[in-house]
Image (tube, rainbow, N blue to C red):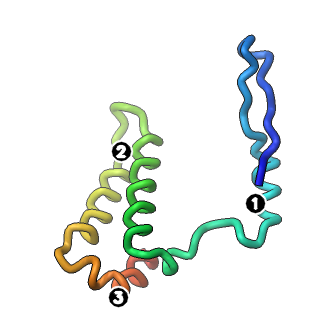
Amino acid sequence: MSFRRIKLTHILPDKPQIIDLPDVIRKINADPDAGPADGLQLSFYEWQQASANHYIFECLSFREGDLAHIPMFLKQHYGFFKNKKDTYELYSYWKDFEQGL
């Protein structure tokens, strides 16, 4: 799937481009396979990567000096699940509960 791009010639002379968000939204809403992933279908390793990506995204959403309560919560929340010695073996049992949180 490709998305339309808009040139920003009025801002900088080297003509940077940005993705046209209305085009992205329209195409994603029209695609029945697009949208949030079903977390229950993720393997343990995919869940680890998704949780790490989510944490990094939230960290980057805050400026230096802000009270980053969401990243602090996520670090503790994901850390609780990741730091158990039997996490991998019990993943299929606790993933339903985790998705509900």
What mark, if any, has residue 13 been given in the picture?
Answer: none
Q: Which residue in the protein does label 3 denote?
A: 93
- In the displayed structure, 40 sits above or below 4; it is below
Q: Which mark is residue 28?
A: 1
- Label 1 Cα neighbours within 10 Å, binned few <14 / some 14-19 / many ≥20: some
Which amino acid, by three-letter code, is at mark 1?
Ile
Left/right placement of residue 28 relative to residue 70 reads: right
Q: Residues within 10 Å of mark 2 (few under 14, many from 20)?
A: some
As drawn, is 88 to the left or to the right of 32? left
Q: Please tell me whether mark 2 sits on a helix, a strand or a loop.
A: loop
Quadrant of the drawing holding the C terminus: bottom left
Element type at marker 1? helix
Query: 63 or 29: which is nearer to us?
Result: 29
Please give left or right for residue 85 compared with residue 1 in the image.
Answer: left
Q: Residue at x 34, y 83 (%)?
A: 94
At a point 44% along the width and 56% down the height, the residue shown is 54
Query: In the rendered picture of this protein, how many numbered marks are placed on residues?
Result: 3
Q: Position of residue 43 (x, y in %)?
A: 43, 75
The quadrant the N terminus occupies is bottom right
Q: Is residue 43 left or right of residue 73?
A: right
Along the line of sight, which residue is nearer the eye, 61 or 34? 34
> Looking at the image, which residue is at 20% across and 68% down?
83
Amino acid beneath label 3: Tyr
Mark 3 to mark 1 CA distance (whole Å)? 32 Å
- In the displayed orientation, state which residue is furthest to the bottom: 93
